[in-house]
Image: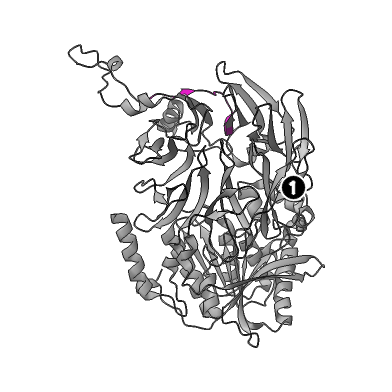
Amino acid sequence: MRKIFIAALLLSSTTLFAQKDASVSFEKWISLKSYGSPIISPDGKIIVYGVSGTDWANNSYDNELWMVKDGDVPVQLTRTNKNSSGNATFTPDGKYVSFVADRGDKRQIYIISVAGGEAIQVTKDEDGINGYSWNPDGTKIVYSKTQPESKKDKTKQERFGAFGIEGEEYQLTHLWILNFNYDSIFLAGQLPCYTSKDTSKTNKSSDCISLPVAKPLTEGNFNVGGFSWSPDGKQIAFNRQPDPLINSGITSDIILIDIVTKKMTTVISNPVGDFFNAWSPDGKAFVYSTLIDDSVSNFYKNNRLFIYDLGTKTNLEIAKDIDENKSVSDWNKSGLFVGAFEKMKFKFYSVNTKTGTVENIPMALDLPGGISFSRNSDAIAVSGRNYTGLNEIYLGRLKQPLKQITNSSAQIKDWNTPINEVIQWKSKDGADIEGVLLKPKNYDPKKKYPLLVVIHGGPTGIDLPDPTPTYVYPIMQWVEKGALVLRVNYRGSAGYGAKFRALNVGNLGVGDMWDVVSGVEYLNSKNMIDTARMGCMGWSQGGYISAFLTTNTNIFKAISVGAGISNWVTYYVNTDITPFTRQYLQATPWSDMDIYLKTSPMTNINKASTPTLIQHGEFDKRVPIPNAYELYRGLQDRKIPSRLIVYKGFGHGINKPKERLAAIWHNWQWFNQYVFGEKEETMALDDKF
């Protein structure tokens, strides 16, 4: 309650300092709750879902579980102080909900009755756990955990101090198996357990009951990724790779391990990455995604899905007629289900497991998300939203109307949210480009508006219509202030098929710039914008494109580069995903320096003239911070107004609310000064960062 009170007090106080020309403060906007990750009970009568909110007191985001029984009023199921509750699933008998939380003893598994009451601890692993899964009859739990630092490693550090060898700094993850029964959990700790041999003690260790202890299931010099019990509970499928480093995923194989003998059998081992997705209901087959033998274009090509028959040892490729990246939702008694984007909408499909063809399952949602199938009924739980609302939780059945059981959108019912319009235009080379144009509710077609362009990351990300676009760009507030905002799905974005996804290969920055500039020109041709008042911004790949626009155009009055690449050579030798660069530029710097120069913002730094804000995380491994310093120094040497802000302790994303608030303010001030011509507005509570 104290945490809730402090958060409420902070919101009520800072709302008094709402930003100029904006009716919703940044704090209130950041504090929007989000709903998702629904699971449905075996009998289809109970839904549990996550609600994520902002914990200002602890500068974190908190996820807790909520429950709905028989369509009744939702009730909060978990409350984990200072940490989140997640990874929820029903126990196989449906009587309890299990979840993972850190309640002062590292991440452990807990169960809580669907009838209510306190959560009960199931594991007490001294290292904490990652993910877990119940066997079908509920008598065993398998979980993964990362191995702690070894005694040998500690001894080495004591003697030689701290040093690291590139590519060798990691701890492996393995599977552990735990026998489970309710009695041992409920009675644990009721009698003290003594390890002393002192016979005067009244209770020996054999006289008491403690939490069950897990035993290792996998061991060896390899790393375990995703895993899943077979329907008969006799074996587990898992993804194996040499180490947990991100680039090693391309070597992943699919392994089956026998629970009793621990014998491991490699069943899928293509030249490059194979990833287990789901078992068939009878356990005679499974579906997996694979790169087959593609190690040179997997970053931008569509993935491929196959069904592997364990009996015949044959593969059937499925969903070939979906020209996009595909995700497997589930394989159950009702069928095999996959999902994929189609432009700016997300669609679910059922798969014919004999032919591999698909059939669209209509849903009255623009963007359905997670879907959970009841094991013993035909009920489903779905999360999703339409373009004009926030994510909600729904109950229903396939091919039937869904019943909404949450009201997340009530949070914004009185907000002055923008109008979202999907628009299309032709790029410089004739490519068809789509974007989302956000306009104020009082939009006047006779008026010309300032324009702010916001560019998504990826590049295989996608921008979608959204009433409250978030992260570190105050889009909603700028629209209310009197601007138009354009969010561009530039070439390479998800949702538009394999050919479009590959259009910026060998042409990064250049083609992306065409798509952004042509979008601006399209709006200008409609007499909608004031070209003397325009700005541009983006994070990650969006930051790179913004940096490219900084050094290759002069149409914007201000630009913000968030975690952006400034020099592909610098990026190539520093990033944790080096193959990304080789694939998109089709070369290394040492084999074709020209393509690296053509696509690097720094190449044309002497042409730069646009005031540029640079934002970067101190410990970013995806786009290492030398990219920020390089661009900043080049702009400073050119005496171009520029500012570099480093967010201390952060990686590639700003994932704490207070620093996110700061980053929002930094963008708000920058563009208000250079696009709107206003004096720098002080930050909330009259504090400046």
Image color mode:
one colour
Q: Is residue 314 left or right of residue 332?
A: right
Q: Range of the magenta residues?
A: 212-227
Give residue 53's position: percent from left, percent from top.
43, 56
Give residue 175's position: percent from left, percent from top.
52, 28
Q: Is 213 one of the magenta-colored residues?
A: yes
Q: Is 349 one of the magenta-colored residues?
A: no
Query: Which residue is situated farthest in the right direction here?
Result: 430
The residue nearer to you, when weighing 568 against 144, is: 144
Q: Is there any visible trace of residue 687 in the rendered image?
A: no
Give residue 115's position: percent from left, percent from top.
38, 40
Q: Quadrant of the N terminus?
A: bottom left
- Secondary structure, mark 1, is strand
| Residue ID for mark 1 | 359
Identity of the residue drawn at 39% across and 46% down: 77
> Is 78 above or below relative to 549?
above
